[in-house]
Image: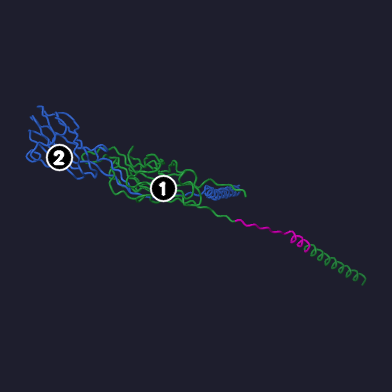
Amino acid sequence: MTQWLTRSRASRTVAFAAVLLLGVGVAPTLASAAGVGGQASGTSSVTAGNWGVTATVTSMTFTTNTYQTSKVTNTGTIALIAQSYSVIVSNPTSGSPTFKVFQCAVAWVSNLCSGGAGAQVGGTLAKNSTTTITSTTALAAAAAVYLQVEPASVTASTTVTLSPKVTSPTQLRAAVKTNQ
Amino acid sequence: MSKHSHTVKKERSYGKIAVAGLLTTSVGLLATAGVYAGLSATATGAEQVSSGTLNLTLTPDVGVGFSNFAAKMAPGDTNNVYVNMNNTGTLASAAGMTLAIAGAPANALTNGTVPGEGLTVTATQCSVAWTLATGVCSGTTTPILATTQVSALATPVALSNIPALVAATGQVAHVQVSLGLVATETSTNGVAPGSTIQGLTTTLTYTFTEQQRTGVATNQ
């Protein structure tokens, strides 16, 4: 009985192997019957740019009406046509301070932009608010702009938080079409 | 004595029978061999056959053809290259051609990991050579691939309207391949979002594939 079983297994193994061999033999035949194909290829490399601006100071705490500044630099590789700032004004324990943001192409000196007032970005910001203001100043890669936050009516510690933002594609340079 | 004589005669008789049997068998065998030799016949015919070739080549049409883009791409930018696809084999191709694009390394520019963003490809053929300076076709344009995300071209995609230009041998297709970049991302204080296509580099391999025409049965 044991011998018969062994022979039976051996027969099955042989049959299975035969089927496998047959399959291996048939597969290439079918593949070759599909015909010939022509193929051509080419390669190109591409790199996407970066976009964004970085502010040297993003949080300013005011206890008096003294102006404070921040330098904003285009740290990306793509030129910009605009930048936005999300400005959060905290809620002081007393008083109703207001804030204005001005920008200048050069560093502020004695609260002045090349002897002037600079360009205001957005409107007047009230306490306990979150506002997005946008500047349409063009900034080449690595170029900078200088902000000055000018408070009024500060009677208690108030914090202004600036988050500079750049959104694609609307705030990036115009699209470029290249033929090469 | 008489018994001995009878035995000798009997042995001689057996010998004669054996010799006769051998002779008969030999004659029979020779006769059979002769019959077979007489029935053998051979006929031959010659037929010459040559297999065809199916070759697809990709060469610059105008400009440098597929090459590297030196500038950093911004969303909305378009980089155009101009290539000729030519069926240089001796067989016509079947109606239809496919394009597959592989990115190395595969990243968010090519694999669709940032939904709605990444590289796109558009292909358009012109009835004559393209004008490099303007990217304009002075003949008739035919779209062969609408703007498609590269991530959707990881597996071959059928092109449209190709047969008219490369189906027959020696025919050339003047094709503009436009590479675009799509991205809607906001960077905050100089930091890109967690999932971004910014600052990535990849090398794209475009593979065009054609198949031979349908097999032909000839009776002659």
Circle 2 marks a residue in which chain?
A
Residue closest to the far front: B138
Instruction: Please check whether the numbered discs 2 and 1 fall on a single chain.
Output: no
Q: Residues within 10 Å of mark 1 (few under 14, many from 20)?
A: some
Q: Residue A46, position in %: x, y? A: 32, 47
Q: Residue B191, position in %: x, y? A: 23, 41
Residue closest to the far bottom: B1
Mark 2 against mark 1, which lies toward the viewer? 1
Res B84 visible: yes
Quarter where residue B153 is shown? top left
Quarter where residue A112 is shown? top left
Depth check: give the residue in front, A17 or B216: B216
User: Which amino acid type corresponds to the residue marked 1 in the rendered image?
Assistant: Thr
Left or right of B118? Residue A129 is left
Q: Residue B31, position in %: x, y? A: 79, 62
Q: Which chain is blue?
A: A
In the image, the segment drawn in magenta is: B30-47
Separation of marks 2 and 1 at Cα, in angstroms: 50 Å
User: Which amino acid type corresponds to the residue marked 2 in the rendered image?
Assistant: Val
Q: Would you place residue A31 above or below residue A117 in this image?
A: below
Q: Mark 1 sits on what residue?
A: B207
- Look at chain B in the picture and name its colour: green
* Element on which disc 2 rests: loop
Examine the structure image and report whether residue B31 is included in the region drawn in magenta. yes
Depth check: give the residue in front, B9 or B157: B157
Q: Mark 2 sits on what residue?
A: A57
- Residue visible at 42% across and 48% down? B85
* Element on which disc 1 rests: strand
- Residue visible at 48% across and 46% down? B167
